Image (tube, rainbow, N blue to C red):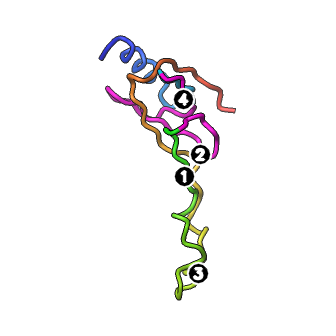
Amino acid sequence: MNYNQQHMYELCKKHMHSYVLAEMNDGTQVDGIITGIDDEYVYMAIPIGQDNNMGSHHQHHRPFGFGGFGYGYPGYGYGFGGYPGYGRPRRFSRLVLPLAALTALSVLPWY
């Protein structure tokens, strides 16, 4: 582990479970909560539904089910209670970033 990786590891460890803004070596910025760290990666929970300027790194998730099937299957109807009855929508998505790609970390306020 080089000096920069060690420094980023210590910063992430210090700010575990904090809301942070992480900047990567390509200029991409990601805001989220640090949920874990190991020797190679930092694990974050990022808010769903906000534009995090992630480009191709960010995957948009549907809050319910898989979508694309319409209203029930042909011949089967709506099923048990209809489509959106599968619990609460997800508010966060997990993101794994390599420690070697991190260049800066800033703690953000929760509000």
Whichever of labels 2 and 3 marks the residue nearer the N terminus, that label is: 2
- What amino acid type should be assigned to the residue bearing mark 2? Ile
- What amino acid type should be assigned to the residue bearing mark 4? Ser
| Residue pictured at 37% horizontal, 30% vertical | 41
- What amino acid type should be assigned to the residue bearing mark 3? Tyr
Label 1 and label 3: CA atoms lie apart by 23 Å
Whichever of labels 2 and 4 marks the residue nearer the N terminus, that label is: 4
Task: Judge the density around disc 2: few (<14), some (14-19), many (≥20) Cα neighbours within 10 Å.
Answer: some
| Residue pictured at 57% horizontal, 61% vertical | 64
Dot in front, 4 or 1: 1
On whether residue 44 falls in the magenta region, the answer is yes
Contact (Cβ within 8 Å) of mark 2 with mark 4? no
Dot in front, 2 or 4: 2
Whichever of labels 1 and 3 marks the residue nearer the N terminus, that label is: 1
- What amino acid type should be assigned to the residue bearing mark 1? His
Label 2 and label 1: CA atoms lie apart by 8 Å
Query: Which residue position is annotated with label 2?
Result: 48
Task: Judge the density around disc 1: few (<14), some (14-19), many (≥20) Cα neighbours within 10 Å.
Answer: few
Query: Which residue position is annotated with label 4?
Result: 18
Query: Which residue position is annotated with label 3?
Result: 78
Task: Give the quadrant of residue 109.
Answer: top right
Percent x, y of residue 34:
49, 32
Label 4 and label 1: CA atoms lie apart by 23 Å
As drawn, is 107 to the left or to the right of 13?
right
Percent x, y of residue 58:
52, 41
Query: Which residue position is annotated with label 1?
Result: 61
